[in-house]
Image (cartoon, rainbow, N blue to C red):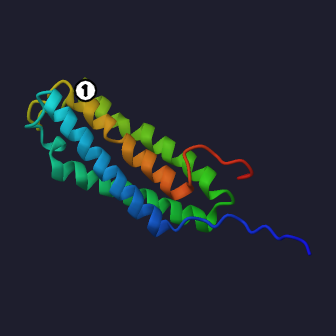
Amino acid sequence: MSERVLPHPAPSVWRGWALSLLSSAVANELLRLAATSAFPVTSFEPLTRPAVFLWTAVGATGAALVFAALRRYAARPAHTFRQVALGVLVLSWIPDLLLAISPPSQLSPVPPHAPWILAALHVPPWLASTWFLTGGVLPRSGEG
């Protein structure tokens, strides 16, 4: 009797979304607390708990929606998602860089460390979403 090997089941998008949202929200809160303790940025609105959680949730939810679409339409959804997610991460740093270079006049004074803290806060949702939606940050052998 021959042994049949079943393919590794694809992770649930809902489960991946929930795990990435929870883990990135916790990581970003710890990062935010450490940054606001170490640097004088507590009065900067984008670094408040509600703002950080809102944008973390938007990022994790957007990632799950993109991955769900890729699972439906892409030949290699995990591989494609990793590339798209990395591209989005890099693009998401552009506003932070612009904030560091030339803060808009309608914002309250921008503390010098704030743009770099904001940029760092983009990494946990990227990492968690990539990990929990695709099963890892790097391609698996045989993923094709």
Q: In the image as oriented, which residue stretches furthest toward the bottom?
A: 1
The front one of 17 and 4 is: 4
Query: Is residue 48 depicted above or below 115 in this figure?
Result: below
Which quadrant of the view contains residue 69?
A: bottom right
Query: Is residue 66 depicted above or below 130 in this figure?
Result: below
Quadrant housing the N terminus: bottom right
Which quadrant of the view contains residue 6?
A: bottom right
Question: Residue 102 at what x, y percent from top left?
Answer: 22, 26
Q: Relative to residue 80, is residue 42 drawn left or right?
A: left
Q: What residue type is labelled 1?
A: Ala
Within-10-Å neighbours for mark 1: few <14, some 14–19, many 20+: some
Residue in the image at 64% along x and 46% along y: 139
Question: Residue 56 at what x, y percent from top left?
Answer: 30, 52
Q: Can residue 44 be seen in this view?
A: yes
Query: Is residue 101 depicted above or below 29 in this figure?
Result: above
Q: What element carries label 1?
A: helix
Q: Relative to residue 119, is residue 143 drawn left or right?
A: right
Residue in the image at 28% along x and 52% along y: 55
